[in-house]
Amino acid sequence: MGKIFDWIDAKFHVKAPHGGFLQRRLPEGLSYAYCLGGAAFTAYTILLFTGMLLSIYYVPSEHDAYSSILRIQHEVHLGWLIRGMHKWSATILIIFLIGHTLRVFISRAYRPPKELNWVVGVITMVSCFASGFTGYLLPWDQKAYWATEVGTSMAHTIPAIGTYVMYFVRGGIDVDGTTLIRFYSIHVHWLPLGMLALLWMHFHMIKRQGIKRPL
Amino acid sequence: MTPGRTAGTGPPEAAQHGKLGMERRDFLKILVQGILVLLSTLAAVTAAIFAYPARIRQKTVQFIDVSSEDELPGRGIKRVVYEESGRKSIVYLAREGDSYVAFSPVCTHLGCLVSYNRSQNRFLCPCHGGKYDASGRVIEGPPPLPLTRLPMKVEKGRVFVGFKV
């Protein structure tokens, strides 16, 4: 393995620029609370991988969405496992993410010069919540439908522009097939790619600024 | 700084060799690499199993004996009940000019079973009010397509209707 990687690295030169990150000195007194961000990232990669697998069989249409979910669950080899991993990793991601945010907040790691990383982290967290919300509609069952009906109707309460925001989110007056495709697109294209860019920024700022010394 | 907490870039002579003749650092490195290789192999195998189609077979038309030739309608439409592997099913046989056609009773909207109404000479769907005329064309309601015409043949005095299975 090492030889193959060394051969690739001889052309690609990926090892040297990351050496400083992977071999760096860490401050004293770090605890497992400092692993929560990494754990959340692991959940994210599992979600990305299982999500890409699920997209092989999922059909984002009004007519076929629910039956394709049933097919994944009961017919596709290991479909129940992949779908289960996707569902549970999503839950675990949110838990780790909240834990990580609390750790950063309590250890005051958001203070300058790391304030931009805090901002990037918050945008990532909001993207995760949005992923959860859009992904919840995709099974296209009663629970999914009414959760989205209620969730999107909240936009309606924004003064002046509320109605238009709701139309924008739903892609029409009601939650229907248009909403499903819209949410599918946001859930599998826009948010995962956006989060990838945000996480790249997040990790590079950590690389430049280091981990905050514990209190 | 305690050596345990810091990623040591210390001098090699300070390194402690264990029974394996290996530094703790190198052992951990190999362990982590091994776990990564194991996990990615597992993921690749799982993905391959998942992506491999669960149902690989050609859909073929299977002809089922539904009634005797004598029961074919002289004119109009006849509802025929037949039994196939212990389950009773329905098919509509109709005379069209000199030949016969078989209509599937499955509504093309959402799959409810239509019933033929003789006085109206229409196929009526009980679920969403779909109406088809005697030749299966949609007259009213949500069905997007006419009633499915099933392949059919008459052999040795028996009527066979074909289904895709």
Image (cartoon, helix red, strand yellow):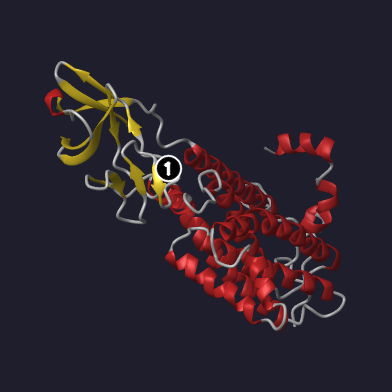
Q: What residue is shown with label 1? A: A77
Residue A93 drawn above or below residue B48: below
Q: Residue at x 83, y 56 (%)?
A: A20
Quarter in which the C terminus of chain A is drawn: bottom right
Task: Decide if residue A175 is on the left or right side of residue A9.
Answer: left
Q: Quadrant of residue A165?
A: bottom right
Depth check, front residue: A205 or A32 = A205
Quarter in which the N terminus of chain A is drawn: top right
Q: Residue at x 62, y 58 (%)?
A: A182
Secondary structure at badge 1 equals loop
Q: Crowdedness of circle 1 by 10 Å Cα count: few (<14), some, many (20+)? A: many
Q: Provide residue A115's location: percent of width, then percent of height.
A: 83, 76
Residue A210 drawn above or below residue B24: below
Q: Is residue A31 visible?
A: no
Task: Decide if residue A174 is on the left or right side of residue A164.
Answer: left
Depth check, front residue: B144 or A129 = B144
Residue type pointed to by label 1? His
Q: Provide residue B145's location: percent of width, then percent of height.
A: 43, 41
Q: Is residue A101 visible?
A: yes
